[in-house]
Amino acid sequence: MRRILRTVKKLDEQRRAVLSKEMCDTLGIAPLDRVEITCENQVITIRAIEAKCKLCGGTEDVDYINDIPFCGECREFGKKRE
Ligand SMILES: [Zn+2]
């Protein structure tokens, strides 16, 4: 059976709302993860995204440098070239 989680939140002064742990666990997201937020037809959707390395497309140990995702290997390779 499909389970729907629904909650009513009040936005704070900066228009932020906090996602419940239960909702985050359902999406498989944790604090500091990145999500895709879409607004369409008066509905805002928050979707978990899998970070992929900008250079090789890898998904292992991805971290962001200047908002660009890089895997651990490519970050190490970049350090050696500096
Ligand atoms: Zn990479």
Image (cartoon, grey):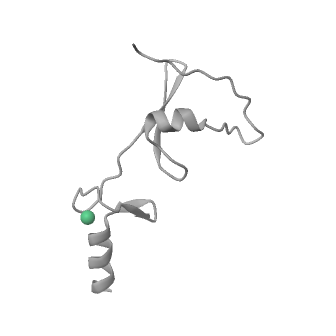
**Quadrant the N terminus occupies:** top left
Seen at 51% across and 47% down, the residue is: 30
**Quadrant the C terminus occupies:** bottom left
Q: Pinpoint residue 20: horizontal percent, then vertical percent.
A: 61, 35
Q: Residue furthest front?
A: 1
Say whether residue 39 is left or right of residue 82.
right
Q: Tally the marks.
A: 0
Seen at 33% across and 73% down, the residue is: 75
Q: Pinpoint residue 34: horizontal percent, then vertical percent.
A: 47, 48
Quarter location, residue 58: bottom left
**Front-most of 42 and 20?**
20
Against 20, is 54 above or below?
A: below
Against 27, is 43 above or below?
A: above
**Front-most of 74 and 39?**
74
Q: Pinpoint residue 40: horizontal percent, then vertical percent.
A: 48, 23
**Front-most of 30 and 63?**
30
Q: Residue furthest right?
A: 13
Say whether residue 80 is left or right of residue 6.
left
Please tell me in which quarter of the rendered image ligand 1 is found.
Answer: bottom left
Q: Is residue 5 visible?
A: yes
Seen at 34% across and 62% down, the residue is: 61
Q: Pinpoint residue 28: horizontal percent, then vertical percent.
A: 43, 40
Say whether residue 63 is left or right of residue 46.
left
Q: Is residue 37 visible?
A: no
Against 73, is 50 above or below?
A: above
Q: Residue furthest left?
A: 56
